[in-house]
Amino acid sequence: MTQDATAPVIETRGLVKRYDGELAVAGIDLVVGAGEIYGLVGPNGAGKTTTMRILATLLAPTAGEATVCGIDVTADPTEVRRRIGYMPDFYGVYDDLRVWEYLDFFARCYSVPAARRAGMIGELLEIVGLADKREAYVEALSRGMRQRLCLAHTLVHDPQLLILDEPASGLDPRARVETREILRELRGMGKTILVSSHILPELAELCTSVGIIDHGRLLRSGRIEEIERSLRATALLRIDVVSDPAAAIDWLGTDERVGDVLEISSERGVARLEVHFDGTPDEEAALLHGMIEAGHRVSSFTQATSDLEEIFLKVTGHDEETAA
Amino acid sequence: MTTATIAPRRRASRLRLFGASVATIMVKELRSRFRGRRAFVVITAYVAVLALIAYGAYVGVAPTAQLQNPFPDELGGVSLAGANPSATIGQAIFTLLSVVQLLLVCFIAPAFTAGAISLEREKQTLDLLVTTPMRPGGIVIGKLFSSLAFVVLLILAGIPVSALVLMYGGASLADILQQQVVLFVSAIGFGVIGLFFSALVKRTQTATVLTYSTMLFLVLGSFLVFRFWTQAATAAPDNTFGTVRTAPEALLYLNPAVAMIEIVASTEIQPGDYSEIMSQIRGVCTGDLCFPTDGGGGGVAPPGLKEVAPAEDTGIFLGVVAGDCPPNARCAFPGPQPAVFEPQPAANHFWPRYAATFGVVSLLLTLASMSLVVPARGRFRLPPIRRAGPGASTGTEADR
């Protein structure tokens, strides 16, 4: 079971999961390399949780295969379990245990030797910022603290891969930031992390790669920059004109690289146009130059920043258009 | 080839993992169960209740026992007219304690196990457990052991109270041991039934209802079925001679009450034979044509059995007067029998059959529960047929 550093930690081929005839996962090919933080993004019911549960050996796939560290999840689930730390989207904690007992229990579950347990529990509590709660009952922890405790429990056996299903859902902004900081620290420790979310900004600055998933299919997958670049081809320009917007729209329509032009608002003599433009930054500059030369009074010319949210909407929207 | 050589080592490590899983779950469960004063209070209360009942039996029986038999027989402590008053008191205490403890165990044991698995499901902690490398079977056994640990502790704590009987006589050490066997078997059996339902259904509430329904059926229902069956068969039109046609005795093999009654009814001073007690239970005994026992039964009928032996004017349960040698009973001479019978060999007792049957059923249910907790497998589904190789996947997905 030796594993070379470049081999993917997660690999699925044609993964399908059907619940009573309903397709939850419709053929997903996912590859996550070592050391990546891979964000699985998609609306509720897209198949994120199902995919993660298959990888966590909780569900058997209907078809296709999935390997973690080169081990098939259905053929040898116990070996897979030793290599992953899994945090479900909904989970409970044992209220009647103390914080250290909780971690001690899971360390025993993973057969961590007694000599290592005590020190390790201290370290983990330090990482998740619960060191001062060591003797407290789990019952008495706030929601954010429980979330962090659950995160700590995934680390007791020093796994290669963390599978975190919506780790920041239901948390207040401050707790979210704390969770994000912990994940960043874990990335620094060289862990591969598969994390899901339906809220995009949560993942945007954290992940090295993202997969956009909808209706059980992986629509896009890759490094964030790559995905952005592939979508940048049809950039969205925001142009504010103070002259006659209709004339400007007509003028823009003559350029063959310009796609749809929409007037999205018109306030106090400023009309904001959204222009789909298929060209390089150089050509964008030429377009602006041309507009001004043609006598249109432009007060603002910006490229709408395509953050993860927009990428997501674009990708899922595009999919729906082609499906229709 | 290679798999054949790896197999034994793998099996050994699996076994070790199984043991470690049991220990891990037990440590956690016992930690939370025995924390604080709760366990201490419950055990104290349990023993106090038993002691109070023993005292009540003494207070209730002692005056009558003295009156009935003011001159104990010097020869064996047992006379034809009635038992030694001390033995009568002992007998009363033994009967009451046996019945009460059985009742408590029947209700307490499932209470601990009926939520063992389903609570983990409800509190959504089961996913965290089964994604660890622990063996699912080990989790189930750990849960069972830790749940039973408390009940076992209760039963053990009750032994000194039961041992009071040895001071009075009326029941021997062997009787007390038999009583303990039935208590333990019942605790384990009903515990396992609770565990099974807990693993089978999603909600604790459903599991609890199913468990207690099963318990009541085994204690009362099976007995009623037995009685109705016997009466219906006997009353059948083709039964021209009116012979008693008994229902299959196996119907009662899971009935703890019958087992306990048999033990209570065949002690030192009322050494009833299994077949006599069974005929009593069958309702064969009518009038004075019944197996003989003397007084001192304590007058408490275990639940469900009141209708079997309608308390006669003496208010004594199970067997009333000396009478003719009953069918199937070993009698030294024909005609009316004295109140004392020879102790019967254990082979002709009912309780070992109960213990053996319930033991086997418990084992099967435990195995069933273990397979129900395995993740990545649908419930109510048989385990998948082992694939030929690790790489062979079911690639039936059609091209898109």
Image (cartoon, rainbow, N blue to C red):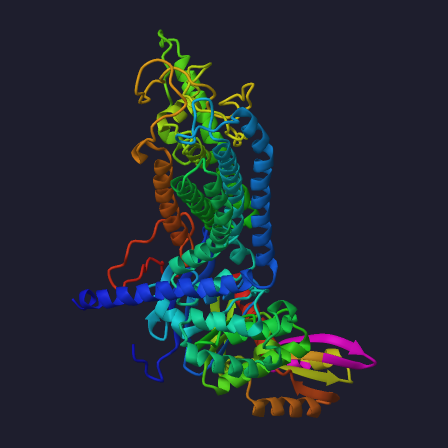
The x, y position of residue B314, in whole percent, is: 55, 21
Outermost residue, top side: B240
The x, y position of residue A255, in whole percent, is: 60, 82
In the rendered image, the vertical position of residue B241 relative to residue A324, given as above or below = above
What residue is at 41 percent from the left and 36 percent from the top?
A: B254
Q: Nearer the viewer, residue B242 or A200?
A: B242
* Residue B374 among magenta residues: no
Name which quarter of the figure residue A175 lies in. Answer: bottom right
Q: Is residue B287 left or right of residue A45?
A: left
Q: Is residue B13 left or right of residue B106?
A: left
What residue is at 52 percent from the left and 32 percent from the top?
A: B302
The x, y position of residue B8, in whole percent, is: 22, 65
Q: Nearer the viewer, residue B221 or A129?
A: B221
Outermost residue, right side: A268
What residue is at 35 percent from the left and 7 percent from the top?
A: B241
Outermost residue, left side: B1
Q: Nearer the viewer, residue A4 or B148?
A: B148
Please provide the residue range marked out in magenta: A251-272
In the rendered image, the vertical position of residue A144 relative to residue A26, given as above or below = below
Is residue A216 at all visible to an observer of this figure? no
The x, y position of residue A156, in whole percent, is: 47, 76
Q: Nearer the viewer, residue B131 or B174?
A: B174
